[in-house]
Image (spheres, grey):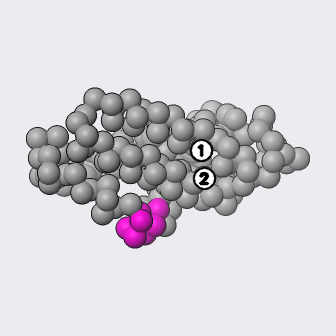
Amino acid sequence: MTNTMKTILKLAALVVLLNAARYTVGGWIEGFTIMEPMHRPMPLFPEAFDQDFTTTDFMISLGYNYAMWFVAAVVFHLLNPVLRGSIWVRSLKSYLLLAAFFCALAAVYMNHYVDGIRPFYYWSMVDALIVFTVVALANALLYPLFFRDRNPTG
């Protein structure tokens, strides 16, 4: 097996654990902070939000989320050697850079909707800051278990 394939498999396994952290820790934080206000517009605008979220929809959503966190893990893996600071700081720098990108996309989409739907996107941005931070901290904890630190001095 090539080193590239080993790296991809390690990243894939890491992302399974990062997703577990995202949905357990992140989901718990979301539950008492942003879920209610973020979902408030949904029943008011049924033409814009899917109210019949099926098991298939949920599985597709998990796949999309896995892909997003996989990309985030790859970006960290590539940036890690050139970032400065402890593994915690480097992980936060990389993941919060991607959170900023996610928030920029949410702002672009938000601009295309009526005022009543826009709060969903505001809260999505807050959600991104929460879950990207949670995943960044989980990454800082778990990444060294999968990869030797390519930036030990920070």
SS label for mark 1 = helix
Q: In the figure, residue 138 lies in which quadrant?
A: bottom right
* Left or right of 35 on screen, residue 72: right
Q: Please, what is the three-letter code of the amino acid marked with disc 2?
A: Ala
- In the image, is residue 13 above or below residue 104? below
The one of 88 and 56 positioned closer to us in this rendering:
88
> Can you see residue 77?
yes
- Distance between the alpha carbons at the discs numbered 1 and 2: 6 Å
* Left or right of 60 on screen, residue 87: right
Instruction: Report if residue 27 lies within the magenta region.
Output: yes
Q: In the figure, residue 109 lies in which quadrant?
A: top left
Residue at the outermost front position: 115
x, y (%) of residue 139? 62, 54
Check the picture and name the quadrant holding the C terminus: top right
SS label for mark 2 = helix
Q: Which residue is mark 1?
A: 95
Q: Which residue is mark 2?
A: 136
Would you say the residues marked 1 and 2 are in contact, meaning their CB atoms lie under 8 Å apart? yes
Q: Main secondary structure of the magenta part?
A: helix
* Left or right of 6 on screen, residue 83: right
**Count of marks placed on residues:** 2
Q: Residue at x 44, y 53 (%)?
A: 127
Q: Residue at x 17, y 40 (%)?
A: 48
The one of 148 and 138 positioned closer to us in this rendering:
138
Q: Please, what is the three-letter code of the amino acid marked with disc 1?
A: Tyr
> Label 1: few (<14), some or many (≥20) within 10 Å?
many
x, y (%) of residue 88? 72, 55
